[in-house]
Amino acid sequence: MGALKKLKDEGKIRAIGVSNFSIQRLQEANKDGHVDVLQSEYNLFKRGVEQEILPYCAQYSISFVPYFPLAAGLLGGRYTKDTTFNDGRARNPLFQGKRSSAIWRRSKRSVKSPMPSRPKWPMSFWPGT
């Protein structure tokens, strides 16, 4: 982190970001308060970051950037349980076996319930907003 902090201080980079860090690794990387952004998987099926990561990010003003927010397209409403894939989704547990049938049913139900036009939470919930 020291080399990245030096580059930031010199104006050569604007922010220091990390990806896929556990809470322990994030705390270690941020021990001097230099982490600006964390990127991790987050969607309706993978919500583990809500327990420790998101509260930590909010507490230390670390921006959070989710990846796969639509669960590799599963939540987009385009695919059916019979759709086959020739890419990484073919190996993804969300798209396989008995578990996938339940997920397909849940995702289909989720797609039919669009988000309300006005969220019920304050927009200032996330750091930097």
Image (spheres, rainbow, N blue to C red):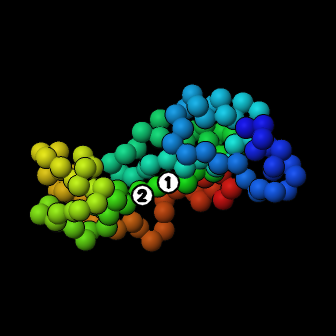
Pick whichever, 8 or 69, lies toward us. Answer: 8
Disc 1 to disc 2: CB gap under 8 Å: yes
- 18 relative position to 9: left or right: left
Q: Residues within 10 Å of mark 1 (few under 14, many from 20)?
A: some
Total numbered labels: 2
Residue 47, given in percent of the width and then of the height, sits at 40, 44
**Is residue 110 something that shows in the picture?**
no
Q: Could you tell me which residue is drawn at 28 percent across and 65 percent down?
A: 111
Residue 33, given in percent of the width and then of the height, sits at 75, 37
Pick whichever, 22 or 107, lies toward us. Answer: 22
Furthest toward the right, the residue is 10
**Please, what is the three-letter code of the amino acid marked with disc 2?**
Pro
Q: Could you tell me which residue is drawn at 25 percent across and 58 percent down?
A: 107
Look at the picture and state if 5 lies above or below 108.
Answer: above
- 88 relative position to 64: left or right: left
Q: Residues within 10 Å of mark 2 (few under 14, many from 20)?
A: some
**Residue 46 appears in which quarter of the rendering?**
top left
Residue 25, given in percent of the width and then of the height, sits at 58, 31
- 28 relative position to 23: left or right: right
In the rendered image, the quadrant that contains the C terminus is bottom right
Q: Could you tell me which residue is drawn at 85 percent across and 56 percent down?
A: 11
Label 1, on which residue?
Answer: 66
Mark 1: secondary structure: strand
Between marks 1 and 2, how big is the CA–CA gap?
6 Å
In the rendered image, the quadrant that contains the N terminus is top right
Label 2, on which residue?
Answer: 69
**Is residue 124 something that shows in the picture?**
yes
Mark 2: secondary structure: loop
